[in-house]
Amino acid sequence: MDVSFQKNLAAKILKCGVSRIYIDPKALDDVSEAITRDDVRNLIKRGLIKKLPKKGNSRSRIRKNMAQKKKGLRNGQGSRKGTKYARLPRKRRWVKTIRAIRRELRNLKKDGKIDKKTYRKYYRYAKGGMFKNRAHLLIHLKEVVK
């Protein structure tokens, strides 16, 4: 039985979408006879036509994914949108590296493992981008300063 007209009327009366209108399948005969808005209103009062509750979107999956991302998961090659330098700019990468190297040089000078002259020389090397990281600096120092 086609009750699409009644469904549309009910949607307008109940101020919601057609998909949220529930018509009792046992009362399809009564509903199909309803022609006017008044008839549909009476069916709503009788409880034969109802407005279904709104459906929400569950955030449980998103929360689970975010918890995994906090652990450092889900960020492999296939999940990346930006380029390497969009995700971590060149300058920020350089600043991170140079600060670590300079901190290491300061500590070595403070501990007396290298003298002021060597410190100054290696400081300049670091500024010139000779070392790719702290470990590289230490390897170089072991080779030269024995």
Image (cartoon, rainbow, N blue to C red):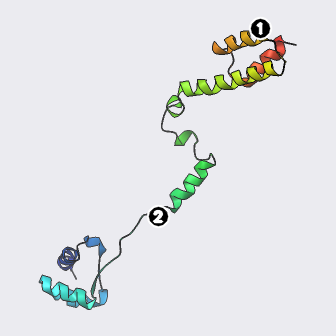
User: Circle 1 sits on which residue?
Assistant: 117
Q: Nearer the viewer, mark 1 or mark 2?
A: 1
Which element is circle 2 on?
A: loop
Q: Quadrant of the N terminus?
A: bottom left
Q: For residue 126, what is the image quadrant?
A: top right
First in sequence, mark 1 or 2: give its number. 2
Residue 144 drawn at (x, y percent): 82, 11
Q: Residue at x 19, y 85 (%)?
A: 41
Q: For residue 120, what is the image quadrant?
A: top right
In three-dimensional space, the C-alpha distance between marks 1 and 2, rounded to whole angstroms, equals 64 Å
Up the image or down, 76 lies above or below 56; here it is: above
Q: Amino acid at mark 1?
A: Lys
Q: Amino acid at mark 2?
A: Ser
Residue 92 drawn at (x, y percent): 56, 28
User: Circle 2 sits on which residue?
Assistant: 58
Residue 22 drawn at (x, y percent): 30, 80
Up the image or down, 27 lies above or below 139; here it is: below
Residue projecting furthest to the left: 36
Q: Nearer the viewer, residue 124 or 38?
A: 124
